[in-house]
Amino acid sequence: MEVLPADGPARGDLPVLEVDDLTVTFSRRGEQPTRAVDGVGFSVAAGETVGLVGESGCGKSVTSLAIMGLLPERGVRVGGSVRFGGQELVGASDRTLRSLRGADMAMVFQDPLSSLNPTVSIGTQVTEVLVEHRDMSRKQAAAEATDLLDRVGIPDPARRLKEYPHQLSGGMRQRALIAMALACSPRLLIADEPTTALDVTIQAQILELLRELVVDTGTALVMITHDLGVVAGLCDRVHVMYAGRIIESADRHDLFARPRQPYTGGLLASVPRLDGARGVPLHPIRGSARDAIPWAEGCAFAPRCDNAQDDCLTEVAGSTVPLEYDGPGRELRCRHPLTYPSTPAGATASGAAR
């Protein structure tokens, strides 16, 4: 992985995580480079839950892997700055990253079956974290692992430690991953779609577990999801991503009540509402994420946006329209945002209800 220099000295009283102008570019011989993450910046304080929201392919997972230093070395170019407690991680040595991962920084991956080693028992996979980072004996680690599985709600934890991933249900595997992530009481936890493919009951239990973790231990949590229901119930602040960039940031309540970016409004309008009138159709966003244009040519969302105008399809619109102040606690990247009060929350057009 080629690393571009990142500047900015460490300062006191910093958030747990600071991401500044993060870029990730994938290159293959004979093909044009692909900018998967393009100037992303946000911060997370202790005890805060921040959401990264967007469709599949918008750069959420690549952002998380770049933060953790888990991207492959070959064909990947990382730029910008990622500071954990003031310590720069972009360009840090493998030894430094390994000492942080599992101990101070942890990640819950999207697919528990592929994230767990199928040939190694659950007990071995949980205890190795404790032995490596907390200097426990095998016996002590086994006792602690049993307690961890019990904390995440796995029944008969002593027996489950001896079982292999394929012997556990999807919900149990996800809980086992969370137990591994919690083993060392990390200061930062990144959860990448932790409730994908789980039934609603198990989803609620896992989200409650994560909520308790943040409240009880002050862990900084980054929740990566496309599920706005998860965001509504868990996140304090939300960053909406599209085509590798953050295009709207706001407090959770403000974002749901008054989305300004047409993309955010489209995401909300696509979700069924229990308080909505019967027979009223949803308003899905037309097209797909593949229809995005490069930011260098204009606003990436313009081909799918009902508010798009001619000035959205210019190089100036894509290259120079920054994430700007849009009221207290809000930032927005859009030339023709949704307007209020005439546009209700979740609408997809400016100036009039649809």
Image (tube, rainbow, N blue to C red):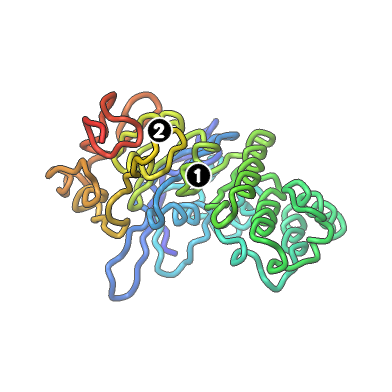
Q: Residue 10 carries which label?
A: none
C-alpha gap between disc 2 and disc 1: 27 Å
Q: Which amino acid does label 2 sit on?
A: Leu
Up/down of 277 relative to 115, above or below:
above
SS assignment at label 1: strand
Badge 2: residue crowd in 10 Å (few <14, some 14–19, many ≥20): many
Q: Are marks 2 and 1 in contact (CB under 8 Å)?
A: no
Q: Which residue is at the front of the view, 134 or 314?
A: 314
SS assignment at label 2: helix
Residue named by callout 2: 255
In terms of image quadrants, where is residue 321? top left
Residue named by callout 1: 83
The residue sitting at 27% across, 68% down in the picture is: 32
Residue 204 x/y as whole percent: 61, 44
Q: Which amino acid does label 1 sit on?
A: Arg
Residue 338 x/y as whole percent: 26, 33
